[in-house]
Image (spheres, rainbow, N blue to C red):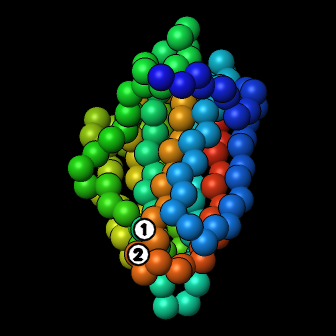
Amino acid sequence: MAQITTTASPKPYFTRQGAAQADTGQTDWLVVPQWANYLWVMLNVTASAGTTPLVDIAFQAVNPVSLTTTHVLKIAEHADMVDNDGTAAQYVFQLGPGVTGIADDSTISATADSYASFNVVLPPIIGIILTLDRTTGNETYTYNLAAYFKP
């Protein structure tokens, strides 16, 4: 069990840029503004030439009272979400109630730009989990992650 600290106070946006030459994981816990109903997330990944690191993104909710990793659960989790192999220019995720009507649109591609929508009610605190794994052992990659809350 680990204590969770939020990365950002309630505001309309959050951004992170990163570069690495090793397997890495990053979780950003964001306080959802009270006025927000929707979350729009964009992930861009660039890999060094001839390499294909695997990139995975997930979303989690945490119990806002305990704020520990013991009390987290995945939201908007689907079996057809695949790892981005670094060849796709960007992934866009939209989370919120009724974003696609009744059904989710969760099919994303490992090798092409993708847009996914998930029908969920935003929790008070949301975790964006980004995992980057090297496949050949020496890739260098950079990424840009942006999250925008909307009313």
Report the amino acid beneath label 2: Thr
Residue at disc 1, secondary structure:
strand
**Residue 135 - label:** 2
Residue 80: x and y in percent read 25, 55
Query: Foreground residue, 37 or 133?
Result: 133
79 in relation to 39, above or below: below
Q: Quadrant of residue 114?
A: bottom left
User: Does the residue at mark 2 contact the one at mark 1 (Cβ under 8 Å)?
Assistant: yes
Residue 40 seen: no
Q: Position of residue 119 (x, y in %)?
A: 38, 35
Q: Residue at x 54, y 79 (%)?
A: 139
- Residue at image point 67% right, 67% down: 19
Q: Secondary structure at mark 2?
A: loop
Is 46 left or right of 134, judged from the image as shown? Answer: right
Task: Tell me: residue 62, above or below residue 119.
Answer: above
Q: Which residue is mark 1?
A: 54
